[in-house]
Image: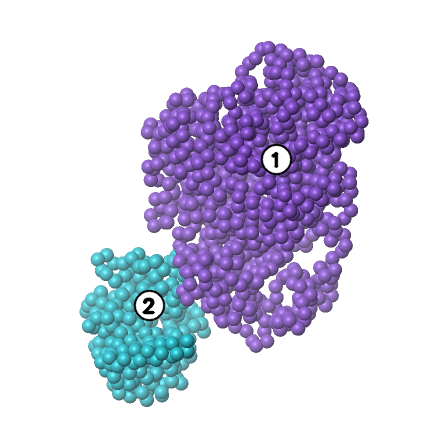
Amino acid sequence: MDANLLALVEGSAAEGAYFETVCRASDRAALERLAAELEEYRQHATNFYHRVRSIFFLEALHRYFLPPHYPQDNSGTIPFAGHQHCLARRFEEAVGVFLAHQKAHGSSDALSSALAAAYHGLAFKTLAQQVQKTVRLVRGNQWMFRMGHPLDYPLRIRRELVDRGPDDPAPVLFEETAVRMDLSHAAWSDIFFLGMDYPEGAKVLNISVNLGVHGRDSDTRPPVCAFLRVIDEPVLRLTSVDLGATVDVKTLDEVFDFAKDYLGLLKAAVIAAGVVPSGLEGSGQELADVLARLCGPGQGLEIASQVRDIPKGSRLAVSTNLLGCLIALCMRATGQTASLTGPLTETERRTIASRAILGEWLGGSGGGWQDSGGVWPGIKLIEGVAAVSGDTEYGTSRGRLLPNHTLYGRDVVSDRTRQELQDSLILVHGGMSQNVGPILEMVTEKYLLKLQREWLARKEAQEILRGIIEALRAGDVAKVAELTTRNFFGPLQTIIPWASTAYTERLITEAKTALGPAFRGFVMLGGMSGGGMGFFVDPKSKAESRAKLLEIMTRTKRALESALPFAMDPVVYDFSINEAGTSATLRKGFEAMLSPEYYLFFVPRWLRQDPRTLRPEVRREMDRFSATSLYTSGTGSLLGPLMRRIFPAQDDRRRDGAQGGSLRDLLAANGFDSVQHERIRDDLRSGRIGLAQNRLPSTAEVEDVRADDVVPIYGADAQAEKVGLQALRDGRVAIVTLAAGAGSRWTQGAGTVKALHPFARLGGRHRSFIETHLAKSRATSRLCGRPVTHVFTTSHLTHAPMEATLRDEKQFGYPGRVVLSPGRSIGLRMIPTARDLRFAYEEMPHQQLDPQKEKVRQSLHKALIEWAISSGEASDYTDNVPMQCLHPVGHWYEIANLLLNGTLRNLLETQPELEHLLLHNIDTLGANLDPVVLGKHLLEGAALSVEVIRRRLEDRGGGLARVNGQLRLVEGLALAREEDEFKLTYYNSATYWIHIDSMLELFGIDRRNLANPENVAAGVRALAAKMPTYITLKDVKKRWGNGQEDILPVSQFEKLWGDMTTLHDVEIRFFAVPRPRGQQLKDQAQLDGWLRDGSAAGVEKLCAF
Amino acid sequence: MATHIKKAIITAAGPSQRRLPLQSLTDRHGESKPAIAIILEEMLAAGLEKVGLVVSPADRSAYESVLAPFANALTFLVQSAPNGYGDAVLCGRQFVGSDPFLLQVSDHLYVSGAEKSCTRQLLDMAEAEDCAVSAVQATHESLLRFYGTVAGTLLSGRKGLYQIDNVIEKPTPTVAEQQCVVPGLRSGHYLCFFGMHVLTPTVFQLLSDDAVANPGAKIGLSPALARLASREKYLAAELSGRRSDLEAHFGVLRAQIALALNGSAREDMLALLAEELALDATRRSASR
C-alpha cells in the first residue's frame, strides 16, 4: 500500500495530511485502486484500530467519494444475499458478496451504497465488540462472568445490614449521588471508542452537582438516591419510586429480562454490581439459592431507586449516575467496598465507573466515560490514559477503557470561584427530548476518519478546555462563560451541526437581547442542546435573569412546540457543587425508613391489600410511617399528598387517561368515518386485513422494468425546458406538498409537525421543510416571472400549527399564493393485534442489533405483545393525548381532500388556466417545478407522470416494477418476497405530475361539477374502493411523569397515491430523474450524510431564501 | 540459613474456634487424641522445640488437662480479651524473643503429600531463604471470604515460590481480581493463606504499632503482614499437602477421613466409606 495511505490508516500521517484530501484529488480509477488496497490491508491488519480506520476509509470512499464519479444513468443492482447478511449483522460476509458482485458486474452507485452500509456496520460492530470485551476484561469484573452456580457464589451481605434486635426493622442502607455537569464539553471525546483510540485528545472538565427545581424545591440535593435492605422473603424486590414501578423478582431469568418493565436499570445495576453475576444468566439455577447464600435462607433484598423529580433529558447523565448510585449501594452491601457508609476510595469509584459501563451495555444503552462523574466529588479533570504493558487494552488500543480522574481541590479552584460559578450559571432544561444516539455515531465516524475540519475543531476544543481550566484557576468565571460560548458556536457545531437547534439559537439570541450586558454566555451540556443547557449571567442579576430566561424559554417553546419534539415545559434548576460524590448512610432502629415518596407509592398499595395478608414487618413499617410522616404537624406531614394519591382528582385522571370529550370533538370535526372504522376493526380482528394481508399474492410475478419503460431525464433538454418554462409563465402549473404527516420516524412518534421542523441550516439559518419548499417555489417564480401557487395539504395534527406559522411568518415572504388544504379524513388508531405485532417482529426484515441490544429488543417485543393483548387487540387507542390517538389515513386521501374540501375548486376558479399539479412529499427536498421535467410531462401528454430514481441500499419501500406484466409502482409493504425489491432498478420518490382534468375524470367528475359536494364525495368513494387499504404499525410516544416517554406501536390504515398507477385506464409515464431530485429525508440520522455528500448544498442552490 | 527455627506459636483463642482443637480425632496411627495434640506432635516431629499456645483465660485449664504430655515443650500464652488475631499473635512476643518463629492456627490439620510434613517443608523453605514465608494454597474465589489472600509474583525458576507484594484479609472477588491476580494460577484462583507462617519478629513491631494506633480496636494480622512485605523479603510457598479446616462445614469429619486415608487405618476407612455408600444405595433403591 502507498506509504502516505498507510500512514493515514495507521494514524501516523504528518500534520495536515488527510484522507479526504487524497480522495478529492483522485479520479474514479484511483479511488477504486485505493478501495482495493484498503480492502486488502484491512483483511490482514493485526492492529485493532488500524483495521477499524481502514474500514471507515472504505465506507467513506463508497459513500462520499466514489458516487460523484458514477454517471447519473449508471445502472447496477444490489445482490439480495449481501443485504441479508447485513440484516443479520454478518457484515464481513456481506462485504464479500458485494465485492464478488462488483468483480462480476462492475462498480455502480447502487453497489457502492451497499458497500458503504456494510462497511459502516462492520466498523461499528468491530468497535462495539472490542468495548464489550474490554468491559468484561476489566479487573474486578471478570469473576462475574465466570460464576455460574450458587455454590460458587462468593458474596455475603454485610453483618451491619442483618444484625438487629428482635423487634427492630431491617437496617436501611441509603446512597445519594450527584449528577455530572460537563462544563468544558468533551467534544464527545469521551465516547469509549474515541478515548481508546486517541487518549491524549479525550479530556473533560466535569463537575458533580446537586439540583433542585427552582420554585419547587427549597434546597438542592443529590438528584439520585437509592435504598437497600434485607427482607424476609426470598425475592429481589426492585422498586423505581419515580417511575412508580415495583416487582418481586423470583427467578434468574426475570433478572436478565431488561425491557419487561421499567426496572431495567435496577436489574442492570444488580447484575453489574455482582449481586446476581452475569455468569448466572441462563444457568437454570434458582434466584432463591443465590439470595440464600447472600443473605441467609429465606431472605432476600429490597432495592429502591429514586430520581428526585429531575426531568429526563437533562443532559446531566442522570441515569448513568443512578446506575452508579445503585452499583455503589449494592457493592457496599455485599462487602465489595471497604466502608459501608461515607465516601468511597478512588479504586472503588473506578470499579463503579467500569461497572456502570457494563450495566449500560447490559441494558443496551451507553454514553461516554465521563457520565458516571457524579460518583466522584466536586470538580475534576477526566482524561484518557494511554494503555501500558499489563493493561488488558495494551496491544489492542492506544488508550485504556477507563480514564483517570484528577480532583481539583480548593487550592486549584478557590471557594470564591466555586461560589461565583454557582452564582453565575443558570442551569435549565429547555424541555426538548431528542435521541442523541445518531450524534454519537456521527462523531465516532468523523473522528476515526480524521476529517480535516473536524480534526481542527477538535484541537480547538482542546485548547478551549485548557483555557477553561486556566480561567477557573484564575477565578475568572466570565472568561469561562466566554470560552464555553465559543466552544458551542465554534468547534462543537463544526463537528456536529446538529448539536444546535433552532430552539437553542432562538433562546440564545433572545436571552442576549433581554439580558443585555448581564448575559455572559452559553454552555451546551451532554450530547446536544435543547434539553439540559446552561446560561452564564452576571451574578448580581441572577434572580432577575433567571425569571427572564424562564419566560423566554416558555414562550419560545410555545412557539415551536409543534415543530420540535418537546417532552415537557422548560424548567430552571437551582444547583450547587456536590463536594461529596456518592455517599452512604446506614439507617437503623426507628430511623430505618425509606424516602417519603417511597411510602406515598407503597402505602396506597398496602391499604388496598387485605390487612390480614399484610406481613407483620409491613404493618410495623406503616406504624412507623404514620408516626413519623403522617400525624406530624407542619410541612413535614405527608397526609395531604397521601390522600391525593389515594383519591386522585378527576382532572388528573382525565389528563392521564385522555378519556374526555376532546377526542370525540376532534373525531367529529375531522371527518371520522365510524362505519368504516368498525369495519376495519372487524376485518383486523378476523384477520381479513393485517400486515400479512398487505402483501400481493405470493403468485404475483414481480420483475424489473424494461429499458424503454422509463423516460430518462438526466441532462439538458432545450425543447422540454422551453415548453416547461412557458407553462410556468402561463400559470398552468401549481405545486402541492403533502404535509399532513407527523414525521413519526423523525421524532420516534413525538407528534410534531414535520413540515414545520427546522431540520437544518440552509441559507445561513435553520429552515423548516415548509420554508425550504417555499424558497424553491420562490426561485421558480423568479425564473418564470410569475409567482407559483403552492398548496400544502394538512391534517388534524398539522393544519392549525401550519396556518399559525404561515400567518406569523407572513408566508416566509413568499410572494405567490399559499393555500392550505385541510384534511377531511381521519382515523382513530387502534391497539395492534398480537398477530400483526408478531408478524412485524418475526416475519418482517429487521436489522439485527448487537446481541445484548437484540436481547433487550426481544424482551421489549414480548412486553409489547403482552400489552396489546391485555389492552384489547384492535380496540381504540385512547390512552394518550387526543392528537396522538388520531392518524391521517394516507396521502391518497390528501389528494382526494383537495376535491372534498373545495381547495381545487377555488384554485381553478381563481386560476382557471391551471392544468397541472406537481405533487410531492414534504421530505423530498430536491423536488421542484423544474422546467425540463415539467416540459417532458407536457410533451409526453400523460395523465400522470411519476418520478423515479435509481435505487440505493437505503431506498426501501418498493419501487417501479412490472407486476404480472403490468408496469406500476409497488409499495414495499405489498411485496410478498423481500428479494423482489432488490430486482428493481428504480425507487419511487413519490413525486407525481398530475394532469388535473384527467385526474378528475378518474374520480368521475369534471371542473364544472367540482362544486357539487355529493358528486365529489361519490367520486372519491368510488375510486377509494379501488385502492388497496394497507395496515401499518406506527410508533407513538406517550409522555408521562417527568419527561418520561413510552414508545408504543399502534395500528392504523392508509391508502397510498402510488397505487393510482395500478389503474388500467390511465395514461402514465415514468421519469427516471437524477437522484438528488428524489432523495427523501426520513430520519435525523440521515442528516449528516446529506450534508456531507453535497445534497444540502444542492438543495440550497434550488432555493431563493 | 543461619537461624534454626525452634519456636512456634499456635493460636487457639479465636471466639469461634476455642473448643474445636479439643475435638478428639483418630490420628494416622489409629490413636484417638485431641486435634491440638496431633498438631503439636507434627510440630515437635518437625524439629521445633518450644511451642506457645495462645488461649483465652477460660479455656486454659481444659487445654492444660489434655496437653499434659507436652508440658515440657508447651507454654500457655493467655489472650485476656478477644482483640483480634493480630493481638493473639502479639501475645507471643515475649515467648518468641528475637528469632523467627512458626505461626500456625489450631483449627487446621495438615496432611502432607510428600515425605516431609507440611510443617517441615515450610521450615526448610524459610531456613533456606532466610526470610519470612507464609504457606499458601491456590483457592477458588468463592472461598475467599474465609482467608487472607496474597498478591505476588512467581520467583523466576522457583516453582511454587512467590514474592509477596501485598496481603488482603478476606477480599471479595472484585478486590482479589484487581489486586491479587498471580500469573500462573488457574482463572478464578488466588493464593490464600494455608494457616501456617514462618514470621520474623518484625511482625510484632508492626502489630504493636497497630495496637497503639488503634487503641481498643481489634487487630488483624493481614494488615501487619501487608506492611511486612514492604519492609523485608517475604515469600509465599505452595506446599505439597493439603489442609483440613475443622471449622468448615463437615470440617471435623473431612479431617478425620483425610487422616485415616493417609495413615495405618486407610483400609478401615475405605471399608467404612464403602459400607456407608452401599447402605445408602440399598435404602434408596428400596424406597423407589
User: Which chain is purple in the picture?
Assistant: A
Q: Nearer the viewer, residue A1074 or A985?
A: A985
Identify whether A973 is placed above or below A412.
above
Residue A272 position within the rendered picture, expressed as x and y whole percent measured from the top left: 48, 56
Query: The disc labelled 1 sits on which kind of residue?
Result: Thr
Q: Determine whether, in the image, residue A234 is placed left or right of residue A53.
A: right
Query: The disc labelled 2 sits on which kind of residue?
Result: Phe
Q: Is residue A852 visible?
A: yes
* Circle 1 residue: A501
> What residue is rendered at 63% in x and 40% in y?
A1031
Q: Nearer the viewer, residue A1044 or A121?
A: A121
Identify whether A773 is placed above or below A865.
above
Q: Helix or strand or loop: what does disc 2 sit on? A: strand
> What residue is rendered at 34% in x and 44% in y?
A395
Residue B32 position within the rendered picture, expressed as x and y whole percent measured from the top left: 28, 85
Residue B177: numbered disc: none
Q: Determine whether, in the image, residue A130 is placed left or right of residue A297.
A: left
Residue A329 position within the rendered picture, expressed as x and y whole percent measured from the top left: 52, 60
Chain ID at mark 2: B
Residue A806 position within the rendered picture, expressed as x and y whole percent measured from the top left: 72, 29
User: Which chain is cyan in the picture?
Assistant: B
Residue B193: numbered disc: 2
Q: Determine whether, in the image, residue A960 is placed left or right of residue A889.
A: left
